[in-house]
C-alpha cells in the first residue's frame, strides 16, 4: 500500500485507507465537483510508522488507563504524544509526504498553503465517525512544515479527549487508524453555505448564504449573509435578500493568520454573488444531492473567481420529528428543565461563571451556566447548546438561544452542580432534557438549519412580523419574509458593549454611544426597508447593568423586575433617553424612515406624554415617525383609552411581562414556572379589552412577547382581532400558517352563518 495517494485516486470504498473525510473528498472529485486539490497520507503509512519505529507496544500499553481518572488520562496523552513526536519516521514515508507536497505545488503553480486534517478510521468499523476528536492544522506551507503537521495529526489521535471518547465508546485503541489529509487552502474572496433542497420543506430549491472573505463568518453566524434561492428545475435565481455585511474573516498576508476585519464601505451592502455563479453553485448542489441520494448541507468558497466545494454532508433537519423522538427514547437523564429553544446537540460541557471564561467555549461545546448574561453572547454563538440553572421561557438565555437557533434548556436548578467540565452530554432543547453521553440521532437547531428562507408564503390579513435582539440575525430574520420587525430589543446590543450607558455619559462619549445604536439599528432597518421596524427603548433591569463597567453604582433592588427599568428609568434619567431619541433622529436622517419607537413598561398615560414631550424637544417630527407603547402592565391595559386619547400609533403586547404582572408569577423563577401561562383567562381578557378599544379607534395592535410564537395564542389573537403578530425567527413560518388557517375558518364560519 502506498504511503500517499492523490485525493482523486480514492472513493467511498477506501474508508480503511483514507478515512471518511478522505473518501468523501475523493468521491466528490470523481463526480466532477471542484474540490481543492490534495493528497492523503494513508492510514497504512501511519501503522507502518508505529510498527517500524518499534513504539507500538509501549504506545498501546500507555493508553491502558482508567480514563475517568483525569491524572491517568493526561499521563497517557503525554506518553503517547511524546512517543509519536520523537520516534523515527521511516525515510521512505517521510520522503513520500514531502515529495507529494512538492508535486502538489507544481500542479498548482505556486508554493501552496495547505490544511492538514485528521481522518480517523476504525479497522472493524471503517465508517465510524471520530469527527472533531483530532486536530486540524491550517495555513501550512513548505515540505518540512507539512511533514511536521502530519506527525502532529498522528499524535492528536492520542489527545485526552480522543482517548476518553474511544474508551467510552468501546473502540480498541490499536484498531483505530489515522489518515492525514493534505489539501490546498482556499483563500476565498467570498464564501458561504448552501442547502441542496429547501431545508424545512424539502422542495427542489437551493438555498445559498454568502458573505465576503473566508467561510467561518457565515458558518459561525458572526455575519448576516446575503440569502439567495435558486430554482433547480428552472436554473434561475428566484429570490435575493442582500444583507449589510459588517465584518469579514481574511488571511492576513503578513502573518498568514486569519483575522476579522470590517468590510470596506463600498462592499458592505453590495451583492456578493452574481446569477451565473449562483446557478453554477446550484448545479454542484444538485450533483451532490443526486450522488448521495439525500439533501446536502454544503460549504463553498470562491478564490480568484473559481468556485470550490469545501465540504458536503447530509441535512439532518428534514425528518426532524423522528430524530427528536429517537433522542427522547434512550439515554440516562442528568438534569431537566424547560425546553427553551428547540433542537438537540451533543458536545462537551464547559461550565462558565462569567463572560471572562468565554475562551473555554470552543465551537460545538455545551455552555453550562447559572444564567447567561449579554456579555456571554459571543460564546453562545459558538456553543452547540446552552443549559442554565435559572430562568423561564422568557429569560435572556431563552430569548437569545432561540434567535441564534441554538438548542437550550433553562431553569434546571442544578446544571452547574451536576454537569462537570469535559463531560459529554446531549441536550434536547425541545423536551428540556439533558442526557449523559451521545444519545441517538440529534435534531439540528431550527433557525441555523432551516435558514428559514420563505419562498412562497400564505397571504394573511393579519400581518406576521418577527422579533430580533441581535442585529446580525437581521438577514435570517428578513429571509422569513416577515412583514416587519415587531420588536427590536436594544438592550442586548447595549449590554453587549460592556459599558453602561451612564459610563458613556460620564466619560463624555455620548457620540460613540449614539453611533453604536445607530449602526446596530440600521443593520436591521436596512434589511427590512421599507417594512416597519419597531425599536424598543432601553429596558434593562438594574441587576444586568451591575456587572458592567460603569454599573458599580447601580442600586440594589429587592425585585428588579418590578423596579427601575424601561420608560420609568428613562424618564428619571432623561439624559439617556435624549441620547436614544437623537439616535432615532439620526436614523431617520440617514434614510431609515421605517424605524418606529416603542416604549416599554408603561403604566400610566403621563409616561407616554412625558416621553413625547422630550421627543418633540429634541426635534423629532411625530407626524413622520411611529410611536407606540408596549402593553405589559395591567395598569396600561385597563386605561388604554387614555393612551388612545393622548395619541399613539400602535400598541404591542409584551406578554412575557403582562403575564408575570397579571398572575404575580416571576417569569425568571423556575419554582413557579408551572403557574406561568399567557393563556390564563385574566391575561386574555386584558388583551381582548385593549384590542377592542384600539380597533374602535383605528390604532394598530400587535404582540411581541414569546406567546406570539405559540400557534395556540396566534389562533386566539386572530379571533380577538389583533392587527399583527410578531414571532421569533424560527416560529414565523408556523405562525403564518396557523394565522392563515384561523382566518379562513373565521371567514368560512361567517359565510355559513350568513347562509
Ligand atoms: C415582553 O415582556 O413580553 C417583552 C417582549 O419584553 P421583554 O421580554 O424584553 O421584557
Ligand atoms: Mg417586557
Image: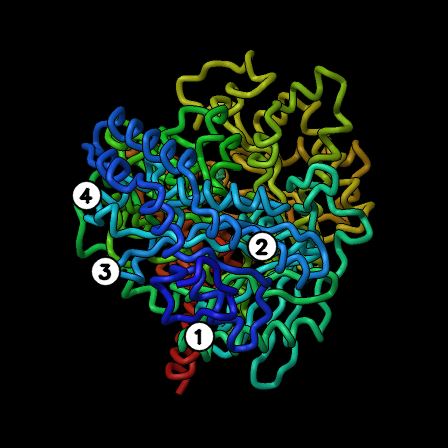
Outermost residue to the bottom: 755
Kind of element beneath mark 3 = loop
Evaluate if marks 2 and 3 touch, with contact meaning CB atoms under 8 Å apart.
Answer: no
Q: How far apart are marks 1 and 4 (CA)?
A: 33 Å
Q: Identify the element where label 1 is drawn.
A: loop
* Residue at the disc numbered 1: 202
Q: Residue at x 42, y 83 (%)?
A: 751
Asked where in the image residue 394 lies, by quadrant, the reply is top left
CA gap between label 4 and label 2 equals: 52 Å
Asked whether, in this view, residue 482 is left or right of residue 25, the answer is right
Kindly identify which numbered label has been placed on residue 124.
3
In the image, is 188 to the left or to the right of 754?
right
Q: Which of marks 1 and 2 is nearer the N terminus?
A: 2
Q: Name the residue under label 4.
A: 333
Q: Which residue is drawn at 79% across and 32% down?
A: 617
The reply to whether the C-beta atoms of the residues labelled 4 and 2 are less than 8 Å apart is no
Where 155 falls versus 328 (above or below)?
Answer: above
Whether the residue carrying mark 2 lies under 8 Å from ligand 1 is answered with: no
Image coords of residue 636 (percent x, y): 50, 39
Where residue 274 sits, quadrant-wise, is bottom right
Determine which residue is flagged by label 2: 99
Q: How many neighbours does mark 4 have within 10 angstroms: few (below 14), some (14-19), or many (20 or more)?
A: some
Q: In which quarter of the image is the C terminus?
A: bottom left
- Mark number, residue 171: none
Q: Are marks 1 and 3 in contact (CB under 8 Å)?
A: no
> Mark 4 or mark 2: which is in front?
2
Task: State whether residue 692 appears in this view.
Answer: no
Amino acid at each position: 500500500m502506498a504511503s500517499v495517494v492523490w485525493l482523486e485516486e480514492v472513493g467511498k470504498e477506501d474508508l480503511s485507507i483514507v478515512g471518511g473525510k478522505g473518501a468523501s473528498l475523493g468521491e466528490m472529485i470523481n463526480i466532477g465537483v471542484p474540490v481543492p486539490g490534495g493528497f492523503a497520507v494513508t492510514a497504512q503509512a501511519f501503522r507502518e510508522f508505529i510498527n517500524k519505529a518499534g513504539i507500538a507496544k509501549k504506545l498501546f500499553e500507555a493508553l491502558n488507563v482508567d480514563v475517568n481518572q483525569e491524572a491517568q488520562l493526561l499521563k497517557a496523552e503525554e506518553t503517547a504524544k511524546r512517543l509519536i513526536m520523537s520516534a523515527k519516521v521511516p525515510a521512505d514515508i517521510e520522503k513520500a509526504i514531502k515529495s507529494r507536497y512538492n508535486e502538489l505545488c507544481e500542479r498548482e503553480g505556486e508554493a501552496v498553503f495547505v490544511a492538514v486534517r485528521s481522518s480517523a478510521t476504525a479497522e472493524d468499523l471503517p465508517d465510524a465517525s471520530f469527527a472533531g476528536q483530532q486536530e486540524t492544522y491550517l495555513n501550512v506551507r513548505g515540505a518540512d512544515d507539512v511533514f511536521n503537521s502530519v506527525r502532529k495529526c498522528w499524535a492528536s489521535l492520542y489527545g485526552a479527549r480522543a482517548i476518553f471518547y474511544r474508551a467510552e465508546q468501546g473502540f480498541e485503541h490499536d484498531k483505530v487508524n489515522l489518515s492525514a489529509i493534505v489539501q490546498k487552502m482556499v483563500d476565498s474572496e467570498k464564501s458561504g453555505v448552501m442547502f441542496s433542497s429547501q431545508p424545512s420543506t424539502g422542495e427542489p430549491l437551493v438555498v445559498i448564504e454568502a458573505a465576503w472573505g473566508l467561510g467561518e463568518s457565515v458558518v459561525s453566524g458572526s455575519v448576516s449573509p446575503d440569502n439567495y434561492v435558486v430554482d433547480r428545475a428552472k436554473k434561475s435565481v428566484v429570490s435575493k435578500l442582500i444583507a449589510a455585511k459588517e465584518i469579514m474573516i481574511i488571511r492576513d498576508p503578513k502573518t498568514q493568520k486569519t483575522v476579522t476585519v470590517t468590510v470596506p464601505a463600498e462592499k458592505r451592502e453590495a451583492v456578493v454573488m452574481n446569477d451565473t455563479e449562483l446557478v453554477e453553485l446550484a448545479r454542484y448542489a444538485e450533483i451532490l444531492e443526486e450522488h448521495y441520494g439525500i439533501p446536502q448541507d454544503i460549504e463553498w468558497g470562491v478564490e480568484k473567481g473559481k468556485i470550490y466545494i469545501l465540504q458536503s454532508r447530509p441535512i439532518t433537519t428534514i425528518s426532524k420529528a423522528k430524530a427528536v423522538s429517537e433522542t427522547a427514547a434512550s439515554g440516562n437523564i442528568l438534569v431537566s428543565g424547560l425546553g427553551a429553544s428547540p433542537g438537540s446537540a451533543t458536545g462537551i460541557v464547559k461550565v462558565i461563571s462569567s463572560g471572562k471564561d468565554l475562551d473555554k467555549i470552543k465551537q460545538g461545546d455545551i455552555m453550562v451556566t447559572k444564567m447567561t448574561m449579554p456579555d456571554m453572547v459571543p460564546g453562545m454563538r459558538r456553543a452547540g447548546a446552552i443549559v442554565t440553572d435559572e430562568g423561564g421561557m422568557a429569560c435572556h438565555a431563552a430569548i437569545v438561544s432561540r434567535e441564534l437557533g441554538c438548542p437550550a434548556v433553562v431553569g434546571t436548578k442544578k446544571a452547574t452542580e451536576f454537569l462537570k467540565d469535559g463531560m459529554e452530554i446531549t441536550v434536547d432543547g425541545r423536551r428540556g432534557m439533558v442526557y449523559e453521553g451521545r444519545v441517538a440521532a440529534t435534531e439540528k437547531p431550527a433557525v441555523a438549519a432551516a435558514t428559514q428562507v420563505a419562498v412562497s408564503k400564505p397571504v394573511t390579513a393579519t400581518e406576521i412580523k418577527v422579533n430580533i435582539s441581535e442585529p446580525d440575525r437581521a438577514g435570517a430574520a428578513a429571509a422569513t419574509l416577515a412583514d416587519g420587525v415587531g420588536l427590536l430589543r436594544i438592550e442586548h446590543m447595549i449590554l453587549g458593549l460592556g459599558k453602561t450607558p451612564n459610563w458613556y455619559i460620564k466619560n463624555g462619549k455620548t457620540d460613540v454611544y449614539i453611533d453604536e445604536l445607530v449602526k446596530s439599528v440600521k443593520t436591521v432597518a436596512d434589511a427590512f426597508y421599507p417594512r416597519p421596524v419597531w425599536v424598543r427603548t432601553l429596558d434593562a433591569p438594574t441587576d444586568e447593568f451591575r456587572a458592567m463597567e460603569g454599573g458599580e453604582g447601580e442600586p440594589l433592588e429587592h425585585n428588579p423586575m418590578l423596579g427601575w427599568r424601561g420608560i420609568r428609568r428613562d424618564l428619571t434619567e432623561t439624559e439617556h433617553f435624549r441620547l436614544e431619541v437623537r439616535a432615532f433622529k439620526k436614523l431617520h436622517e440617514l434614510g431609515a424612515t421605517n424605524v418606529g419607537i416603542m416604549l416599554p413598561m408603561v403604566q400610566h398615560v403621563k409616561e407616554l406624554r412625558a416621553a413625547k414631550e422630550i421627543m418633540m424637544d429634541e426635534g423629532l417630527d411625530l407626524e413622520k415617525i411611529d410611536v407606540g407603547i408596549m402593553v405589559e402592565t395591567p395598569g396600561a391595559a385597563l386605561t388604554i383609552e387614555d393612551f388612545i386619547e393622548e395619541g399613539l400609533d400602535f400598541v404591542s403586547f409584551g406578554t412575557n411581562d403582562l403575564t408575570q404582572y397579571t398572575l404575580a408569577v416571576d417569569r425568571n423563577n423556575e419554582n413557579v414556572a408551572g403557574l406561568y401561562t399567557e393563556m390564563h383567562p385574566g391575561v386574555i381578557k386584558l388583551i381582548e379589552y385593549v384590542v377592542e378599544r384600539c380597533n374602535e379607534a383605528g390604532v394598530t395592535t400587535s404582540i411581541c412577547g414569546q406567546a406570539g410564537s405559540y400557534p395556540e395564542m396566534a389562533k386566539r389573537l386572530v379571533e380577538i382581532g389583533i392587527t399583527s403578530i410578531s414571532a421569533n425567527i424560527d416560529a414565523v413560518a408556523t405562525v403564518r400558517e396557523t394565522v392563515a388557517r384561523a382566518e379562513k375558518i373565521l371567514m368560512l364560519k361567517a359565510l355559513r352563518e350568513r347562509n
